[in-house]
Amino acid sequence: MQKLRVVIVSPALADANNGNWQTARRWQQLLSAHSARIVQQWSGDPSDSDDVMLALHARRSAASVQAWHAQRGPRGLGVVLTGTDLYRDIGHDPLAQKSLSLAQSLVVLQELGVKALPQAHQAKARVIFQSTGTRRTLPKTSRHLRVVMVGHLREEKDPLTLMGAARLLPKGAGIFIDHIGAALDPVLGQAAQAVQLQCPHYRWLGALPHAQTLQRIQRAHLLVHCSRMEGGAHVLMEAMCSGTPVLASRIDGNVGLLGDHYAGLFEPGNAVALADLLLACRSPEIGHSLVAHLQHQCAVRAPLFEPSAERSALHRWVQDLWTL
């Protein structure tokens, strides 16, 4: 294998600690056999001697994509498409559309992502699943159903559906919800505070360190993921690889990770359907078997998200960008 110089363009760096940064940092580690660095923007300085660019986000990294293409053409230029790229920006944003055209190769992060691309670009797209380490399933209490949602409070993550479901749960249902994430939208933060006051079984914990968040996922019976727009949420993989099944909105970004026939899906924005699923999972008659079924379905998918699989796919992509 030829050792290459890889530049990873991430719109967000360590201080943001969001999905883009987590992907960039993990890819840098997985590409340790090469020389990989992370930048927020690639300017094309003459001292830059990179062989391959992996640009996260078609719209937000568009300036770097254009700078690379202007100097070197499409060779070595790969673009990774996020949820906002696939399900919003490429439909109308000229910068995102131009990134699709300039790239030698495109990557989506879940199975249904390719079909969201314009027909003309689908042939140069491939799927690379993100990965996470397998973690042991921590003991879960039998006294109640512990539920966790992880995601900063912003419109795309649709925290209002979780809050609506919390309001619909009857008192004494034995379902307790922890909601983790910073209030990137102050209005949604105020809504979370209001629900917390009205519903003692709902707690908004704000942003937590990643290690603490993982422990809460491991101890939960269920992870809830309400997103309206998603490219392939890493937290779903973290739950599945921790033995914690998922209840998720039926959007391509979630179905592309969980599978077409996953039993824990609800329609986006439908708080009633989410509340019904939570109550079913707590039901004395079917709750245990339903949660066990969801856990089995997640366990079947979990090998897709092993680090060795992502490393192999990523190395193939980098080599192809350089040689094709």
Image (cartoon, rainbow, N blue to C red):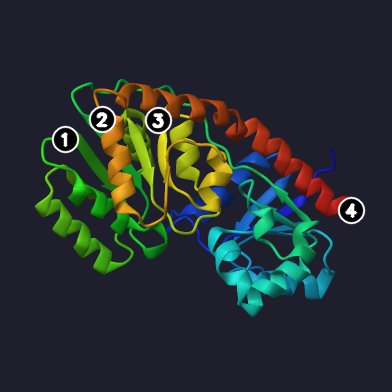
Q: Which residue is mark 2?
A: 282
- Asked if 182 appears above or below 300 in the picture, the reply is below
Could you tell me the amino acid type at mark 2? Arg
Of badges 1 and 4, nearer the viewer stands 1
Binning the other alpha carbons within 10 Å of mark 3 as few (below 14), some (14 to 19) or many (20 upward) gives: many
Cα separation between marks 3 and 4:
41 Å
Residue drawn at point x = 31 percent, y = 31 percent: 281
Cα separation between marks 1 and 3:
20 Å
Q: Which residue is mark 4?
A: 324
Of badges 2 and 4, nearer the viewer stands 2
Q: Is residue 289 visible?
A: yes
Q: Which residue is mark 3?
A: 244
N-terminal of the two: label 1 or label 3?
Answer: 1
CB under 8 Å between discs 3 and 4: no
Could you tell me the amino acid type at mark 3? Thr
Q: Which residue is mark 1?
A: 173
Cα separation between marks 2 and 1:
8 Å
CB under 8 Å between discs 2 and 3: no
